[in-house]
Amino acid sequence: MPSPIIPQIPHYEPAPVTTQPLDYADLAIIDLSQGNTVEGRAQLALQVRDAMSTYGFFYIVGHGYSTDQMKRMFDIADVPFSQVSDEEKQKYVAPTKQTGSYQGYKLRQYWHIDGGVRDQIENYNINRDVNRRTHPEAVRPLLPEISQFARHAHMNVLNPILRLMALGLELPEDTMVNMHGYDTQSETYVRFMKYYPRSAEDEEKTKSVWLKGHTDFGTISILYSQPVAALQILARDSTWKWIRHIENAIVVNAGDAMEFLSGGFYRATIHRVVQPPPDQRRYTRLGIFYFCLADDDVKLAPLVASPLLQRMGFKRWFEKDEDAPLMVDWRKARTSAYGQSTLSKSDKEDRVEEEVINGVLVRHYN
């Protein structure tokens, strides 16, 4: 049979890698190709457990996508922004505040950052079931490739990570995989995200912060590395460390839902986005993510069957397991509130703002 015709689209040319001497986090690099055996997975599980107890972030290589395949995906990622008119974008805006769903566009100036400044970020979100809703005309021919990419991210990146994390808790390795079905009801999605340069006035008002320090609300966040330096994580010594670009690598971190499930053992690390270094400030910053959530009906209570948690102890956010929120409820509450709610200043820490969501104190670091 003839090969399917790949749609021709403009090439997105990324920025050159920065030459600035930045204070980078020394993150572990996990090679998934080494996890094809029981012994290999056991060794990788220890590496992941150690990485999650230090920075809470780590790199993935050996994930099965080539450099050329990823270049194609970045070309695809730019289409919803550069090949769709502002008028057409309005037709596909996500009803985020009303429904707690990101599916569709988040247009610029939706989130409040600081000092009256709103964001200069666009994102387009596509459920792993790409046919769940309609898409802009320019995106439609690319849906088969996006669908294939989502399946690969789920089966060949997410599931191996979940197995390693379950092994790290001394649980059966499919424990968390079974909470993240590919064909079940869930909001797990692909995000294409584009940051645009801001004015000097906005940079001054926000102290160059583009997204406040925050934790993700899902279980696992998968970020495909790109060259514009802007992502920082809050290290255990309370300093901000930059995330270095590694060609064709993936950056992984846990979110709130994973912290709940692991009783606080796998911590959701605080991270933020800031103005890039001077040699990259005239470029846009294009990102590709696979944001992973447990199935809607998963209750976010600690996995108390874990022998490791039984030995070490664990944290409960709710007195009784039945009081813990379902994944769907936590997702809707966090999504609808982000960048829209009124935050209170912390009494204990300067430049920390707080809100209570589903009985949990959520903190934002500015």
Image (spheres, rainbow, N blue to C red):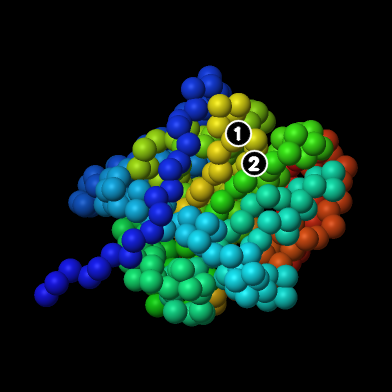
Q: Quadrant of the N terminus?
A: bottom left
Q: Secondary structure at mark 1?
A: loop
Image spot of residue 270 (x, y percent) = 63, 43
Query: Which residue occupies 55% across, 54% down?
Result: 193
Image spot of residue 91 (x, y percent) = 63, 75
Q: How many marks?
A: 2
264 relative position to 109: left or right: left
- Marks 1 and 2 close (CB-CB < 8 Å): yes
Which numbered tag is attached to residue 281?
1
Callout 1, which amino acid?
Arg
Q: Quadrant of the C terminus?
A: top right
| Residue reaching furthest to the top | 21
196 relative position to 165: left or right: right
Q: Is residue 35 above or below residue 154?
A: above
Foreground of the two, 310 or 177: 177
Image spot of residue 235 (x, y percent) = 60, 33
Which numbered tag is attached to residue 197?
2
Q: CA–CA distance between discs 1 and 2?
A: 7 Å
Query: Which residue occupies 73% across, 56% down?
Result: 109
Q: Is residue 241 above or below residue 104?
A: above
Query: Which residue occupies 38% across, 59% down?
Result: 9
353 relative position to 101: left or right: right
For label 1, the crowd category at 10 Å Cα-Cα, with few meaning under 14, some 14 to 19 and many 20 or more, is some
Image spot of residue 233 (x, y percent) = 59, 37
Foreground of the two, 63 or 230: 230
Callout 2, which amino acid?
Pro
Q: Is residue 294 above or below residue 184?
A: above
For label 2, the crowd category at 10 Å Cα-Cα, with few meaning under 14, some 14 to 19 and many 20 or more, is some
285 relative position to 40: left or right: right
Q: Secondary structure at mark 2?
A: loop
